């Protein structure tokens, strides 16, 4: 038996404090990873505060993890000691259901999140099923790749699985922690990219990240001018939007993908979908297949998260800055 040390929350909304937990013999399909970096995601904040009613205390948050494999289970053949790997939202799945068999493990009913019901990445080490420890290409810096394992795959997965291609016109709503990565991936797919934001000061950076066009959604005429122009729109914000206006911005057969979680139900007129065969979709994280592919694409196209670094011991400071939206764009803890 050995111990893993980290920073845990002991009650809803509490500060992180030192915590250690014992681990038994390594499972046959597991790897142990020494953590070098872990991103601070808004989902961590929801779990710390138990906003979703899923948290059990004490627990260690964190699911944007990069580190080095230090031990492998007896049945592991796809990872070896010393491999640099990334771990995202998911740590395990059943492996035998229809979704797992077809490579959509993230849709498995028995999916095991990395830091719900178990301890996550604000720690010195973690254990997960080896299939969910994804090799990180040498070209990628650990600090910049950590947020890709959640924020990155959140935007990459719908681009890939809804078949974005060079002929596609893609809109990204929100140029923040998720959206700034979405712009880069959409450009890597060869798409014509339009960035939507409420902040004019985001325009210069959105264009530098790869957007071809910028629309300020506080400009009453801005969204109307985009009517009928986009094949795919990714909504990355967790605030209420003019979703009816964004449906109007879709071309026939276009899709609006909801990635952030707005507080109010979406109010969409049915006829606005029927007439142009338009669709509204949701997308969570992605499968190990998608994570492998995303990291390869990021390495080849220079996609990276813009990060602010914090020492692991300063995790409370990082969490507070993320909560106040004072990080541009992703906070990363470093051991």
Image: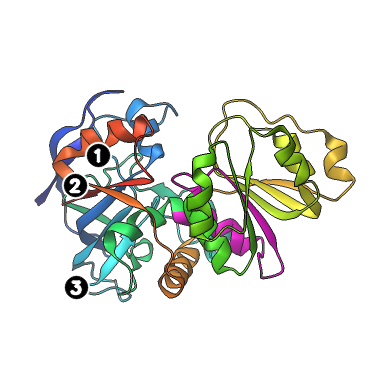
Q: Which residue lies furthest to the left in this view?
A: 2
Q: Residue 280 in the image: x percent, y percent?
A: 71, 45
Task: Name which quarter of the figure residue 253 lies in.
Answer: bottom right
What residue is rendered at 30% in x and 76% in y?
A: 77
Between disc 2 and disc 3, whose residue precedes?
3
Range drawn in magenta: 152-179
Secondary-structure class at tag 1: loop
Distance between the alpha carbons at the discs numbered 2 and 1:
7 Å
Q: Residue 158 in the image: x percent, y percent?
A: 60, 56
Q: How crowded is mark 1: few (under 14 residues within 10 Å), some or many (20 or more)?
A: many
Q: Name the residue under label 3.
A: 81
* Residue 176 lies within the magenta run: yes
Is 292 situated left or right of 269 in this image?
left
Q: Nearer the viewer, residue 247 or 180?
A: 180
Q: Which of 129 and 158 is in front in this view?
A: 158
Is 103 situated left or right of 251 in this image?
left
Q: Which of 46 and 72 is in front in this view?
A: 46
Inspect this view and state whether residue 286 appears.
no
Q: Name the residue under label 2.
A: 123
Is 241 situated left or right of 7 in this image?
right
Q: Residue 250 in the image: x percent, y percent?
A: 77, 49
Secondary-structure class at tag 3: loop
Between disc 1 and disc 3, whose residue precedes?
1
Task: Name which quarter of the figure residue 102 lies in.
Answer: bottom right
Marks 2 and 1 close (CB-CB < 8 Å) = yes
Q: Mark 1 points at which residue?
A: 60
What residue is rendered at 45% in x and 56% in y?
A: 152
Secondary-structure class at tag 2: loop
* Residue 217 lies within the magenta run: no
């Amino acid at each position: 038996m050995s111990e893993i040390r980290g920073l845990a929350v002991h009650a809803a909304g509490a500060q992180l404090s030192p915590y250690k937990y014992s681990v038994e013999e390594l499972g046959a399909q597991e790897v142990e990873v020494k953590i070098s970096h872990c991103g601070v995601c808004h989902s961590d904040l929801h779990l710390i505060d138990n906003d979703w009613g899923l948290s059990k205390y004490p627990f260690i948050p964190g699911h944007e993890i990069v580190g080095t494999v230090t031990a492998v289970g007896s049945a592991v053949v796809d990872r070896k000691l010393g491999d640099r790997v990334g771990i995202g939202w998911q740590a395990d799945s059943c492996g035998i259901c229809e979704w797992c068999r077809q490579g959509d493990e993230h849709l498995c009913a028995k999916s095991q999140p990395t830091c719900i019901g178990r301890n996550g990445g604000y720690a010195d080490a973690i254990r997960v099923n080896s299939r969910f420890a994804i090799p990180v290409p040498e070209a990628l810096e650990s600090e910049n790749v950590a947020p890709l394992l959640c924020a990155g795959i959140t935007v990459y997965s719908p681009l890939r699985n809804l078949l974005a291609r060079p002929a596609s016109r893609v809109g990204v709503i929100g140029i923040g922690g998720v959206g700034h990565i979405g712009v880069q991936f959409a450009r890597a797919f060869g798409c014509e990219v339009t960035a939507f934001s409420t902040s004019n000061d985001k325009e210069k950076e959105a264009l530098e990240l790869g957007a071809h066009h910028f629309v300020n959604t506080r400009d009453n005429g801005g969204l109307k001018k985009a009517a009928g122009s986009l094949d795919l729109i990714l909504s990355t914000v967790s605030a209420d939007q003019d979703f009816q206006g964004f449906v109007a911005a879709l071309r026939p057969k276009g899709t609006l993908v909801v990635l952030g979680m707005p507080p109010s139900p979406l109010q969409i007129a049915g006829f606005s979908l029927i007439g142009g065969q338009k669709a509204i979709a949701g997308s969570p994280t992605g499968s190990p297949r998608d994570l492998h592919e995303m990291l390869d694409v990021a390495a080849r196209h220079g996609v990276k998260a813009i990060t602010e670094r914090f020492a692991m011991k300063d995790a409370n400071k990082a969490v507070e800055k993320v909560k106040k939206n004072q990080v541009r764009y992703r906070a990363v803890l470093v051991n």
